[in-house]
Amino acid sequence: LISVRFSRTRRDGEPPLVNGWIPFLGKALEFRKNAHGFLAEHKEQHGDVFTVLIAGKYMTFIMNPLLYPYVIKHGKQLDFHEFSDQVAPVTFGYPPVRSGKFPGMDEHIQRSFRLLQGDNLDNLTESMMGNLMLVFHKDYLDGESEWRTESMYQFCNSVMFEATFLTMYGKPAHTNRHSGMVTLRQDFVKFDNMFPLLIARIPISLLGGTKTIRDKLINYFHPQRMSTWSNTSGFIKERAALFEQYDCMGDVDKAAHHFAILWASVGNTVPATFWAMYYLLTHPEALAVVREEIHCVLKVSGLEADHNRDITFTREQLDSLLYLESSINESLRLSSASMNIRVAQEDFSLRLEGERSIGVRKGDIISLYPQSMHMDPEIYENPEMYKFDRYVEDGKEKTDFYKDGQKLKYYRMPFGSGSTKCPGRYFAVNEIKQFLSLLLLHFDMEVVEGQEPCSLDSSRAGLGILLPATDVQIYYRPRQAREEE
Ligand code: HEM
């Protein structure tokens, strides 16, 4: 391992610096292997704010969630997009948006995010429901009605990938499904496996065939091809129209932007769907309550589960599924490991609570690591345990969680924070709700007995929802079959 001598010494007012001869690469690897444990250990030694050199960057970790608001609200000196604007273009292969080459584009892109939220969710939700039913029927419900086996991750991936794709980008001319979807998904998985390395700025040329695969994925979104698709979401349509306004933007660059959105819209949603499904299926009491809740909502609306008919849930109905939402949020708490990053624009003193402040230098990275908060036993009793109703109290969503006797403003952060908060978060939770509702209404499903409990693969710690270390085998059959017997 390469070792570097710290040229930097701690100045007065700066947080403790993890100092000395540090195995440069070693810290980065140690961090990636077990970020949560690494940070907990440093917190024990250095307190709730400290600076570590990781992969060549000085990173100051704010470990106490009571201090999060001071970082999240801090606008002027802490830049939110600098990091992503450097990393995303290299990862997805488009020219940096804030390079000055595309005046006004960044603001437009930020504005386009509203098309994933509020009333715009009605159309997205309706379209997603139709697409989920299409894929479920064609691939899993039609035909033989006996028990079949499947791998759970594979199942979630094939359904959510295609249904989300169709909802975002639309369908091809004259048919409901895109040809080549299986290949597209397989290529996407190959690219996604390399994602942590790309984010770590390993040049794509060193990653075997990854460049060829990425080129293939990008080409799928060539503007000429996309122009033949219909039922495209307003969000993607607005972005495509925006790119057309820039003559200096090549077709491949436009396509690469669309590909990046594909990653944003399924890269985390698929593993999140997996965990939500896995925890429900392995906790029968949770499954029973959630199933009952879904049936109740349908009954109140006069829509008994009729297997011969497509079911639709309005956005209001989805919003009213309190236990289902809590169960999804609980699985997000257990599986998310995203890092929130801000880059200091100048040397300054970051005010924390009371009289406390810390010295920060230009270029330093201020990081929040919410997984440490999600797993804090003071905030969440038995944090390793899945409690599907953790976020329900007195028939309402529970929002009061405490640390050191103080109510926390931020207690669950799978979607980031402040101005980099995921713009797709409402759509993501909705589509997981839709997936699970349809699953529980239309399938009998069981986890094959005798399998080890599924654990988290931490190789993408810091980057979002963790994948399962192994897949899980399930049995399923169309639910209708049982009722006909
Ligand atoms: C950004 C998480 C689903 C679109 C983010 C960020 C996080 C996140 C943590 C912030 C990254 C940062 O700090 O820079 C998740 C999770 C999801 C999910 C956990 C599923 C469970 C979605 C979906 C969409 C989406 C379904 C779109 C339909 C985006 C976009 C950004 C983003 C466009 C970049 C925002 C920006 O540049 O300011 N997501 N996301 N996400 N997400 Fe999501």
Image (spheres, rainbow, N blue to C red):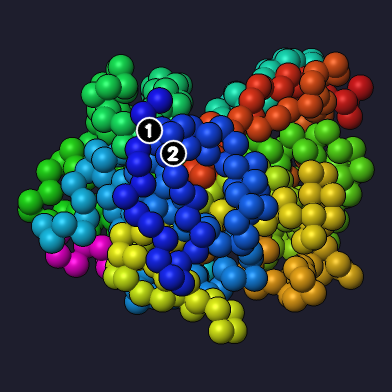
Q: Quadrant of residue 111?
A: bottom left
Identified at 16% across, 57% down, the residue is 99
Q: Quadrant of the C terminus?
A: top right
> Is residue 36 visible in the rendered structure shown here?
no
Number of marks present in the image shown: 2
Judged left or right of residue 117, residue 335 is right
Do the residues bearing badges 2 and 1 touch, measured as CB atoms within 8 Å?
Answer: yes
Q: Is residue 8 magenta?
A: no
User: Where does the magenta region start and end?
Assistant: 102-108
Task: Pick whichever, 50 or 204, lies toward us.
Answer: 50
Q: Quadrant of residue 186?
A: top left
Circle 2: element type: strand
Q: Quadrant of the N terminus?
A: top left
Residue 328's x, y, as percent?
71, 49
> Is residue 380 visible in the rendered structure shown here?
yes
Mark 2: amino acid: Ile
Q: Report the Cα–Cα distance between label 2 and label 1.
A: 6 Å
Identified at 73% across, 19% down, the residue is 473
Q: Residue furthest bottom?
A: 355
Identified at 42% across, 39% down, the residue is 21
Residue 179's x, y, as percent?
39, 24
Judged left or right of residue 439, residue 259 is left
Judged left or right of residue 310, residue 261 is left
Q: Which residue is mark 2?
A: 22
Q: Neighbour class for label 1 at 10 Å: few (<14), some, many (≥20)?
A: few
Q: Identify the mark nearer the N-term, 2 or 1.
A: 1
Circle 1: element type: strand
Note whether 78 is above or below 370 in the view shown: below
Residue 258's x, y, as percent?
31, 44
Q: Which residue is mark 1?
A: 3
Mark 1: amino acid: Ser
